[in-house]
Image (tube, rainbow, N blue to C red):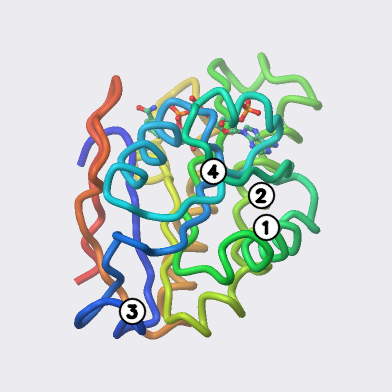
Amino acid sequence: MGGSQSSKTTAGTSARGEGRGHALGGSAVAVLGASGGLGSAIARALAGRGSRLLLAGRDPSRLGALGLGTPLVGVDVRDPGCGQRIAEAAVRTLDGLDGLIDATGVVAFGSLLDHDDDTIEELFLTNAMGPLWPVRGVLPLLEASRGFVAQLSAVVAERPPAGMSVSAATRAALTATDDALARELRAIEAGEPSVPSTAFTVGVRDEG
Ligand SMILES: NC(=O)c1ccc[n+]([C@@H]2O[C@H](COP(=O)([O-])OP(=O)(O)OC[C@H]3O[C@@H](n4cnc5c(N)ncnc54)[C@H](OP(=O)(O)O)[C@@H]3O)[C@@H](O)[C@H]2O)c1
């Protein structure tokens, strides 16, 4: 597997699509981190397939700059209330939610001694705790639609290199969260993300 991983958890048979999972056309999907490299590519790919999108991120003007003409909601994943705000915006603008894609993240390189307190805190708040809040907020909507969650982790979670002790630890937390969440939702489905690769190859962890 290449540089990043995406695991997709789903509640099973779609209410709107055929068989397992959702047909993307017409589905209501919130993309978090849509101002980023991967998030913007994912948002464009979904828009091209006819999904109805809600873009979420810290700066609505950066989200609007994508030019997709979708509803926007300003959220910071360090805020435990961000999931509720995404859920409310989804109900208001999309009449519900079929999927959440979380492409947020921060990274820092260097030895542990190079990381100051604020950097370590920011990494854990954003990468380890941050992914919990959006999922927790929108889960009731996804349960209702039998929808899906996709979160981008990183290969450093499983093969942590020197110089990334903190960043790798935060992504390992996300990967563990994903594993447990998939079991909680009692259905797992993995598929190749329909987004262009960046500097690293985007891969998929097959949970078997
Ligand atoms: N790019 C790769 O090849 C690669 C490889 C391995 C893993 N990954 C993983 O994939 C994810 C995305 O990578 P990327 O290359 O697209 O990164 P990126 O271009 O730096 O984008 C990061 C995104 O996260 C958002 N973000 C950061 N902190 C946030 C916060 N507190 N609240 C809300 N949003 C926040 C940023 O929003 P702002 O616009 O507000 O800054 C931006 O939209 C990361 O988790 C990374 O670990 C990527």
Query: Of label 1 and label 3, which has the lower sequence position?
Result: 3
Left or right of 3? Residue 97 is right
What kind of residue is marked 2? Gly
Residue to which mark 3 is pinned: 16
Check disc 3: other Cα within 10 Å, few if <14, some if 14-19, many if 20+.
Answer: some
Distance between mark 1 and mark 3 Cα atoms: 21 Å
Helix, strand, or loop for circle 3? loop
Distance between mark 4 and mark 2 Cα atoms: 23 Å
Residue to which mark 1 is pinned: 86
Helix, strand, or loop for circle 4? loop
Left or right of 78? Residue 107 is left
Residue to which mark 4 is pinned: 70
Q: Residue at the front extreme?
A: 69
> Pointers 1 and 3 in contact (CB under 8 A)?
no
Is 192 or 177 nearer to us in this picture?
192
Distance between mark 3 and mark 4 Cα atoms: 21 Å
What kind of residue is marked 4? Thr
Q: Position of residue 187 (x, y in %)?
A: 33, 81
Q: Position of residue 170 (x, y in %)?
A: 57, 43
Query: Of label 3 and label 2, which has the lower sequence position?
Result: 3
Query: Of label 1 and label 4, which has the lower sequence position?
Result: 4
Q: Nearer the viewer, mark 1 or mark 4?
A: 4
Asked if disc 2 is less than 8 Å from ligand 1, the answer is: yes
Query: Of label 3 and label 4, which has the lower sequence position?
Result: 3
Q: Nearer the viewer, mark 4 or mark 2?
A: 4
What kind of residue is marked 1? Ile
